[in-house]
Image: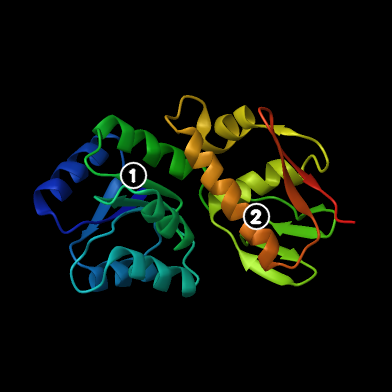
Amino acid sequence: MRLLLIEDDLPLSGLLVRQLQRQGYAVDTAADGPSGLALLRQGDYDGCILDRMLPQLDGLSLLREARGAGVRTPVLLLTALGETQDLVEGLEGGADDYLAKPFAMPELLARVAVLLRHGPRQSGPLCRAFDLTLDPDGLLLTGPGGSCSLTPRERDMFLLLMGAPGEVVARERFFGQVWGTGAEIGESSLDTYIYFLRRRLRAVGTCTRLATRRGVGYCLEGGR
C-alpha cells in the first residue's frame, strides 16, 4: 500500500518513513503544505499522515482544500494540539483520525492499519433507511433536504445504523467493526463521532434522529 507523509520535522519524518517501510508500506513525503497538497491531489494514495502545523499552508487548511477538491484519501492528522476543540476542528475539517504528539510508534502504526482497512475503496450497494440514502462508494448521505459528504469512518458508522433501522447498535459494535478489535480508542472518540453524525443528519434535512440508549448504544428512529 502507498502512503503520503506530510511532515516538516525532518528527523521525525525520517523515523516515520523507516518504521512504515518496515511494515511494508511505500511512502512518499512532503515537508510543507503546498507540496503536500499537490501530491495529495495528484497521487493515488491509500492513506495520508498529515501534520497539522506546516509551513506556508497549515495542515487543517490543506485538508479542507483537498476535501473540497474531491480527494477522499483517508487521513490521519498529527498534532501537538490535544484539546477537545482541536479534535473537533480536525475531524470537522475532514480528518478520519487524529493523534496528538508525542505518540507511541506502536499506536501510530495501529491507527494507520485501521485507517487503511476502512478506506474509501470499500464498495457496496446503496443503503436506505427511513428517508435516508447512503452511497458507500461515493461517501454520500442524502436526505429530503440535500446531500452531504462523509468521511470513511462516518460512512461505516451509518452503515451499521442504517443496516438495523430502529434497533439499538451497541457501543461495542462501533468499536469492533468501525475502529477494529483491539484498537486503543477512547470512549470520547465515539461520542465525538456521534456528534458529527447528528450534524450530518441535520445537514440533509431529515426527520430521522440518532437516539441515545444510555449505557447501551444508539439507534436511528424515523421522524414523526
Q: Position of residue 135 (x, y in %)?
A: 69, 59
Say which of marks 2 and 1 sits in front.
2
What SS does tag 2 mark?
helix
Relative vertical location of residue 183 with respect to residue 81 in this rendering, above or below: above
Relative vertical location of residue 180 with respect to residue 26 in this rendering, above or below: above
Residue indicated by mark 1: 99
Q: Position of residue 213 (x, y in %)?
A: 72, 34
Relative side of 30 to 108, left or right: left
Q: Position of residue 70 (x, y in %)?
A: 50, 71
Residue indicated by mark 2: 198
Relative vertical location of residue 184 with respect to residue 89 in this rendering, above or below: above
Q: Residue furthest top?
A: 182
Q: Please say whether residue 1 is visible from this viewpoint.
A: no
Residues packed near mark 2 inside 10 Å, few (<14), some (14 to 19) or many (20 plus): some
Question: Which amino acid does the dot numbered 1 rest on?
Answer: Leu
N-terminal of the two: label 2 or label 1? 1
Give the camera-side residue of 8 and 24: 8
What SS does tag 1 mark?
strand
- The structure residue drawn at horizontal position 38% and vertical position 41%, both measured from the top left corner, is 112
Relative side of 45 to 216, left or right: left
Relative side of 107 to 19, left or right: right
